[in-house]
Image (tube, helix red, strand yellow):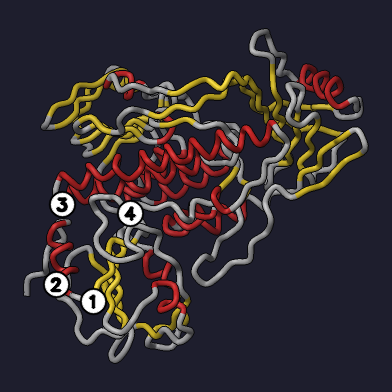
């Protein structure tokens, strides 16, 4: 019997599955589709998600498969204008990834499936969740003709979520009265070094964005609210000729295409008993700013370690923090994406730091303890190991455990299962020779920093008793001597 059933094998479900697999949780990942998604819908990977991918062990593969965002070329009446959608930001010791990555969604999902296979698991395609029953003891799901019991169920099954609808959870919001299309195409007549955009901010807007790591363009454009749309190669060629005035742009092949209505919606709740919502099942966003896929991945990254902890003995109340932490984030992101959409319509959109998701945190979470940085992302820091080898703090965090860092502390707490302890100073295993750890965390001798498995600071304190009490409450057992 699986401990967790995940419905939906997009980026949300795949990240959730990888995180459960890393923690030895038995799960079933199903998707009603007959085969993997083949389109580029979500193509922007934000810096915080790159940090998550480093922890999952797939960052280098993602970067190798994608590339940087190209400059945008706007075709205006007085000639083309080139501009940067995102300005390059140099990495820092605390923030090693500060530029977004362009990677078509089908490539992202392929790499995540490969990582899942390395961990001994696979998606079960053509397995549709038809319904389920749940009570305080668990969930019984109807998947095709089979009945499958489990401890928990996660709906990562998109905006039309069967899980959300079965639970009767409201999905309020609004349609933005904007209809658009997106298509992955092979085309002639355009250089592939810029993101071409015509008629910006109008209903006749159309764009051809070269998809990094491929020979494809992502063709996007606005549409009337009603009427048929021809998204064949001939139909898109005719639309491009009409909207650009350039008959030399010819679409040779359409690999995938979709028509959609933009909307902004947020589920009333992320949990009902032993059933959870994640990703588009819990929130949908306009595509502006490249936030939807990234917010969904962060949902999975947040929920998975908590599910695993509770399944291994942590208090059930830990799962209450999932909605408390992630729903306010989605609400904030909805505000950002709708504002960026408005700016795009006024031809004034720029993606700044707020789109990078590095500054998002959970200061009001029930899991957040004392300390000025508690609840926020744990910064990286270059260090030296006691044996003289360089090491980054993120490398020490790349495991499914809690991490405790002591800065020039006199004593070390007793070991616990699921807790990794590192210290600087006399007999410490780390040397902060560049002062980067001290600076990033504003540390003084005697300070302790406790970092959650998802890379957020749980608390900082000079009193080891604070650490011990917190760890007791989270269910991390003291090792028996």
- Res 148 quadrant in image: top left
Please state the horizontal and vertical placement of residue 267, each as a whole percent of the image. Answer: 36, 28
Q: Nearer the viewer, residue 30 or 189?
A: 189
Element at label 4: loop
- Horizontal relation, residue 136 to residue 218: left or right: left
Disc 1 secondary structure class: loop
Q: Quadrant of the C terminus?
A: bottom left
Looking at this rendering, what residue extends furthest in the bottom direction? 426
> Quarter-wise, where is residue 422 in the image?
bottom left
| SS at circle 2 | helix
Side of 16 where 52 appears, left or right: right
Identify the mark at residue 465; answer none if there is no mark: 2
Neighbours of disc 3 within 10 Å: few (<14), some (14-19), many (20+):
some
Q: Position of residue 325 (x, y in %)?
A: 32, 45
The residues bearing labels 3 and 4 have C-alpha atoms spaced at a distance of: 21 Å
Residue depicted at 39% across the width and 40% down the height? 122
Residue that mark 1 sits on? 462
* Foreground label between 2 and 3: 2
| Distance from the alpha carbon under mark 2 to that under mark 3 | 20 Å
Identify residue for label 3. Answer: 314
């Amino acid at each position: 019997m699986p401990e967790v059933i995940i419905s939906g094998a997009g980026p949300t479900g795949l990240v959730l599955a990888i995180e459960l697999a890393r923690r030895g949780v038995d799960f079933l990942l199903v998707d009603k589709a007959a085969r993997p998604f083949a389109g580029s819908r979500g193509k922007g990977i934000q810096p915080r998600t790159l940090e998550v991918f480093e922890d999952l062990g797939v960052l280098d593969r993602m970067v190798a498969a994608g590339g940087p965002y190209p400059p945008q070329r706007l075709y205006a009446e007085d000639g083309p204008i080139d501009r940067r959608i995102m300005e390059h930001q140099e990495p820092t010791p605390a923030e090693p990834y500060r530029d977004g990555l362009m990677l078509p969604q089908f490539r992202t999902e392929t790499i995540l499936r490969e990582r899942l296979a390395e961990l001994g698991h696979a998606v079960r395609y053509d397995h549709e969740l038809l319904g389920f029953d749940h009570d305080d003891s668990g969930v019984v799901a109807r998947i095709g003709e089979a009945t499958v019991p489990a401890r928990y169920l996660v709906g990562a099954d998109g905006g039309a979520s069967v899980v959300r609808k079965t639970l009767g959870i409201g999905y309020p919001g609004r349609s933005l009265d904007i209809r658009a299309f997106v298509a992955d195409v092979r085309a002639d007549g355009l250089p592939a070094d810029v993101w071409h955009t015509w008629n910006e901010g109008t209903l006749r807007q159309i764009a051809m964005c070269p998809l990094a790591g491929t020979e494809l363009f992502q063709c996007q454009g606005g549409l009337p609210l009603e009427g048929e749309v021809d998204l064949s190669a001939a139909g898109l060629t005719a639309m491009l000729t009409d909207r650009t005035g350039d008959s030399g742009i010819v679409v040779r092949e359409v690999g995938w295409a979709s028509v959609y209505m933009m909307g902004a919606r947020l589920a009333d709740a992320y949990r009902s008993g032993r059933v959870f919502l994640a990703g588009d099942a819990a929130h949908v966003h306009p595509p502006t700013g490249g936030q939807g896929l990234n917010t969904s991945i962060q949902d999975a990254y947040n929920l998975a370690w908590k599910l695993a902890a509770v399944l291994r003995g942590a208090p059930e109340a830990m799962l209450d923090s999932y909605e408390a932490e992630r729903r306010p984030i989605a609400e904030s992101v909805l505000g950002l994406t709708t504002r960026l959409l408005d700016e795009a319509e006024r031809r004034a959109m720029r993606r700044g730091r707020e789109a990078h998701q590095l500054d998002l945190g959970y200061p009001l979470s029930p899991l957040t303890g004392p300390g000025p940085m508690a609840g926020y992302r744990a910064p990286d820091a270059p260090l030296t190991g006691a044996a003289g080898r360089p090491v980054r703090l993120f490398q020490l965090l790349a495991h499914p455990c809690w991490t405790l860092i002591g800065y020039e502390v006199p004593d070390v707490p007793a070991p616990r299962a699921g807790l990794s302890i590192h210290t600087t100073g006399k007999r410490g295993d780390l040397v902060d020779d560049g002062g980067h750890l001290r600076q990033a965390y504003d540390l003084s001798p005697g300070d302790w920093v406790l970092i959650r498995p998802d890379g957020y600071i749980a608390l900082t304190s000079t009193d080891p008793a604070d650490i011990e009490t917190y760890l007791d409450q989270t269910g991390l057992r003291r090792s028996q001597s």
